[in-house]
Amino acid sequence: RNPGRPLTKVNILVAATMSAGKTSLINALLGTDLLWSANEAATATITRIHHNNRDEKVIRGISFTWEGESHQIAEAVDNQLLHAWNASPHVKHIELSGHLSAFANSRFMPVIYDTPGANNSQDSTHALLLKEALNECDDGIIIYVLNATQPATRDDVHLLGEIKQHLDTTPEKRIIFILNKIDQLDEERGETLARAVEATAMYLENSGFSAPIIIPAMMSSSLVARKMLSRLSITRMQKNHLRNELLRFRVNKHALNDVARIPEKIRKILSKELMRSIPSSEHSNEFCDSELRQFTDYSGVRTLELYLKHYL
């Protein structure tokens, strides 16, 4: 790219029903628990995260009221401050800015939109905020997160119908799907990865999405692996879960890549990355750094990053 020319801004809007793992996906891209995540309606505002090329360690933030006035400014935001802003009835949207390492050396400047789950029956403003964000993004990409353990719910059918109507009027936009929480499938009950992806593809085709891009993922595990690489603290439960996933990872590092509905170019790049290094000990119950990096390749977040870098 021409270093003297400003990069084009690209909107990346992340949408889902409640508790599908939308916030975990964004945190996995960031490599840290910046956005508040919970097993409930954790997002109540529109949060825009602007990437900049300055390699800084802090994320700056401003919260805005419903009247469009500045509510609070912070030179360095953290999880607790964002949780407070998000929970405040006075805050409509949040603007964050910082260096997102996932997009270093990218050909574009991403703006990631974290949106509320539109199916919150206790707060009708969530659906209005999502609709406003969709209309605000004239181009770019929608990342829709599906919960692999709760396929084709009524709320998903409704929200996907609204998004399909929106896409029909904005053909310059595209959509891809993250089939999240695949590490929670019960294989002993026949809930295999291949069946889950196939069923999701059929469901999306029947919902009007032709040849959908589907990336199976375990975004919470991706985030834990990236936090370990950065020497950030994790809980005992997170570490135990990651150890269990380590066993499946070592059996077949290509399991998710093989069934993903992605362009062949991306599949080949990822396959090469997965073959670069060999675990130091297949009998160890701990990750070494090289294996942690490969695990993020395996777990879906790297697949998403490759797609965004190559197709935006």
Image (spheres, rainbow, N blue to C red):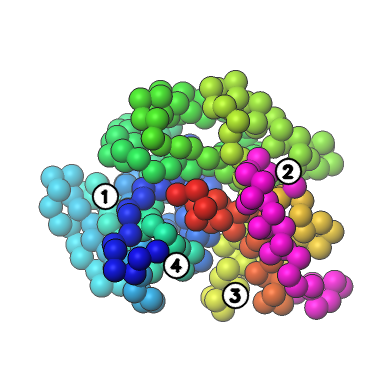
Question: Alpha carbon of mark 2 to alpha carbon of mark 1: how far?
Answer: 37 Å
Mark 4 nearby-residue class (10 Å; few <14, some 14–19, many ≥20): few
The answer to which of marks 3 and 1 sits earlier in the sequence is 1
Question: Where is 233 relative to 167, above or below?
Answer: below
Inspect the image, locate mark 4, and give the three-letter code of the amino acid beneath it: Asn
Mark 1 nearby-residue class (10 Å; few <14, some 14–19, many ≥20): many
The residue labelled by disc 2 is 259
Q: Is residue 261 magenta?
A: yes
Q: Tell which of 286 and 98 is nearer to you.
A: 98
Q: Of the numbered discs in the image, which one, if any, rests on residue 93? A: 1
Question: Alpha carbon of mark 4 to alpha carbon of mark 1: how far?
Answer: 28 Å
Left or right of residue 120, residue 188 in this image: right
The answer to which of marks 2 and 4 sits earlier in the sequence is 4
Inspect the image, locate mark 3, and give the three-letter code of the amino acid beneath it: Leu
Left or right of residue 57, residue 136 in this image: left
Question: Alpha carbon of mark 2 to alpha carbon of mark 3: how far?
Answer: 27 Å
Q: Nearer the viewer, mark 4 or mark 1?
A: 4
Q: Secondary structure at mark 4?
A: loop
Q: Nearer the viewer, mark 2 or mark 3?
A: 2
Relative image position of residue 254 (x, y in whole percent)? 76, 54
Relative image position of residue 31 (x, y in whole percent)? 51, 66
Q: Of the numbered discs in the image, which one, if any, rests on residue 219? A: none
Inspect the image, locate mark 2, and give the three-letter code of the amino acid beneath it: Val
Question: Alpha carbon of mark 3 to alpha carbon of mark 1: how far?
Answer: 31 Å
Q: Report the span colored magenta.
A: 258-286
Inspect the image, locate mark 1, and give the three-letter code of the amino acid beneath it: His
Q: Is residue 55 magenta?
A: no
Mark 2 nearby-residue class (10 Å; few <14, some 14–19, many ≥20): some
The answer to which of marks 4 and 3 sits earlier in the sequence is 4
